[in-house]
Image (tube, rainbow, N blue to C red):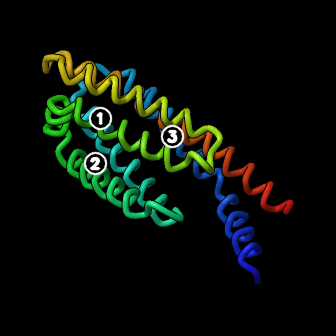
């Protein structure tokens, strides 16, 4: 089997799982809708949901690290940081909520940086890399804005922008699902 045939087979095999990204995207949007319905009185629930969001995002980046051709170490670091942070947040959701509200700007800056790096890493592969770049830049703007707010305001900001983060992540994952499906169809025709 030639190298070209191996690549074609690998792409075809991976593209069979395009629906996983679609399911993940839908799940992120459902999480966004749940978060946006909550108020600051449900601190424990919000802390747990945000922890779960971080954990799942970390698992997704660890999967990307296993499948990626390059930058494996970077995706692995992002994944480990997010998984550990998510696990800690889920184990103590009330403490997680107050800690997240205190360091909200840093959290959103971290996510924004991940998305910007991801956009540039996908520049030659993904025609819609610029959507991830825009989402990353928006997260950085939100990070600087949220960093200057008082704690009480941060609690509400945490709710709103965690919901927005989940919504953007869901839309990006759904877009990736259809891109993966399209690439698989193209590879099968070659």
Q: Which residue is at the front of the view, 62 or 38?
A: 62
Which of the 4 quarters of the picture holds residue 149?
top left
Q: Quadrant of the C terminus?
A: bottom right
Residue drawn at point x = 65 percent, y = 41 percent: 127
Real-space CA distance between mark 2 and mark 3, rounded to the nearest whole angstrom: 17 Å
Q: Give the mark toward the camera: 2 or 3.
A: 2
Query: Residue 157: x percent and y percent?
Result: 27, 20
Q: Are marks 1 and 3 in contact (CB under 8 Å)?
A: no
Residue drawn at point x = 65 percent, y = 63 percent: 14
Query: Residue 48: x percent and y percent?
Result: 27, 40
Real-space CA distance between mark 1 and mark 2, rounded to the nearest whole angstrom: 16 Å
Q: Which residue is mark 1?
A: 109
Query: Residue 2: x percent and y percent?
Result: 75, 81
Query: Residue 131: x percent and y percent?
Result: 55, 33
Q: Are marks 2 and 3 in contact (CB under 8 Å)?
A: no
Q: Which residue is mark 2?
A: 86
Residue drawn at point x = 70 percent, y = 60 percent: 16
The label number, if any, that marks residue 27 in the structure image? 3
Q: Sequence-wise, which precedes: disc 2 or disc 3? A: 3
Image position of 182 with respect to 66: above or below: above
Mark 3 crowdedness (10 Å alpha carbons): few <14, some 14-19, many ≥20: some
Which of the 4 quarters of the picture holds residue 13?
bottom right
SS assignment at label 1: helix
Q: Quadrant of the N terminus?
A: bottom right
């Amino acid at each position: 089997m030639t190298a070209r045939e191996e690549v074609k087979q690998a792409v075809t095999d991976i593209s069979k799982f395009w629906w996983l990204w679609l399911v993940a995207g839908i799940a992120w949007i459902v999480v966004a809708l749940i978060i946006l319905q909550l108020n600051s009185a449900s601190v424990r629930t919000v802390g747990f949901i945000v922890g779960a969001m971080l954990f799942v995002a970390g698992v997704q980046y660890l999967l990307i690290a296993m499948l990626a051709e390059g930058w494996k170490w970077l995706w692995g670091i992002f994944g480990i940081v997010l998984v550990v942070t998510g696990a800690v947040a889920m184990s103590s959701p009330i403490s997680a909520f107050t800690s997240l509200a205190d360091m909200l700007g840093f959290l959103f800056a971290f996510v924004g940086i991940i998305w910007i790096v991801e956009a540039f890493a996908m520049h030659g592969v993904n025609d819609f890399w610029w959507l991830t770049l825009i989402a990353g830049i928006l997260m950085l703007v939100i990070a600087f804005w949220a960093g200057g707010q008082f704690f009480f305001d941060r609690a509400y900001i945490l709710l709103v922008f965690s919901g927005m983060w989940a919504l953007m992540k869901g839309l990006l994952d759904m877009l990736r699902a259809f891109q993966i499906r399209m690439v698989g169809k193209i590879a099968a025709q070659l």
